[in-house]
């Protein structure tokens, strides 16, 4: 099974060193690809969570390379030869 996405949720706000207010995120689970398709595994449910979550590309773990960049299905390789 391959980990496709990390699932994160906004759990609050904080002020950075420049005085800007930013969102605080918590990883609450993962989307994994199995034999029968994609599966969602929730590992945490934040208190007061509004139900909205973000799917992010997994961050490389120590000693691993980052995953290759994914291409959009609508892009084409050669700008001189449009797909129509």
Image (cartoon, rainbow, N blue to C red):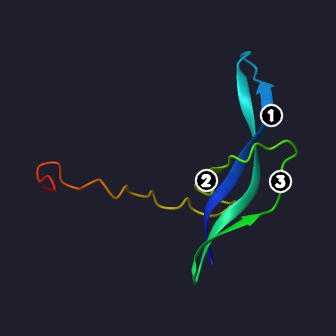
76 to 15, vertically: above or below: below
Q: Give the class, few, some or many, for how many residues have Cα within 10 Å of label 1's Cα (few <14, many ≥20).
A: few
23 to 52, vertically: above or below: above
Q: Give the class, few, some or many, for how many residues have Cα within 10 Å of label 3's Cα (few <14, many ≥20).
A: few
Q: In x, y percent, where is residue 5?
A: 61, 60
For label 3, the residue is 45
Of badges 2 and 3, the one in the foreground is: 3
Residue 55 is labelled as: 2
Q: In x, y percent, where is residue 34?
A: 60, 79
Give the Cα distance between marks 2 and 1: 18 Å
Q: Is residue 33 left or right of residue 78?
A: right
For label 1, the residue is 12
Q: Give the class, few, some or many, for how many residues have Cα within 10 Å of label 2's Cα (few <14, many ≥20).
A: some
On-image quarter of the C terminus:
bottom left
What residue sits 62% from the left and 58% below the top? Answer: 58
What residue sits 16% from the left and 56% below the top? Answer: 83
Query: Which image quarter: residue 73?
Result: bottom left
The answer to whether mark 2 and mark 1 are in CB contact below 8 A is no
Helix, strand or loop at label 1? It is strand
Upstream in sequence: badge 1 or badge 3 = 1
Upstream in sequence: badge 2 or badge 3 = 3
Q: Residue furthest right?
A: 47
Give the Cα distance between marks 2 and 3: 15 Å
């Amino acid at each position: 099974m391959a980990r496709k996405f990390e699932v994160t949720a906004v759990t609050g706000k904080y002020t950075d060193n420049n005085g800007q207010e930013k969102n605080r995120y918590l990883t609450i689970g993962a989307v994994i690809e199995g034999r029968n398709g994609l599966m969602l595994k929730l590992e945490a449910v934040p208190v007061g969570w509004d139900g909205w979550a973000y799917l992010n590309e997994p961050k490389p773990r120590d000693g691993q390379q980052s995953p290759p960049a994914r291409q959009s299905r609508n892009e084409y390789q050669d700008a001189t030869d449009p797909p129509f």
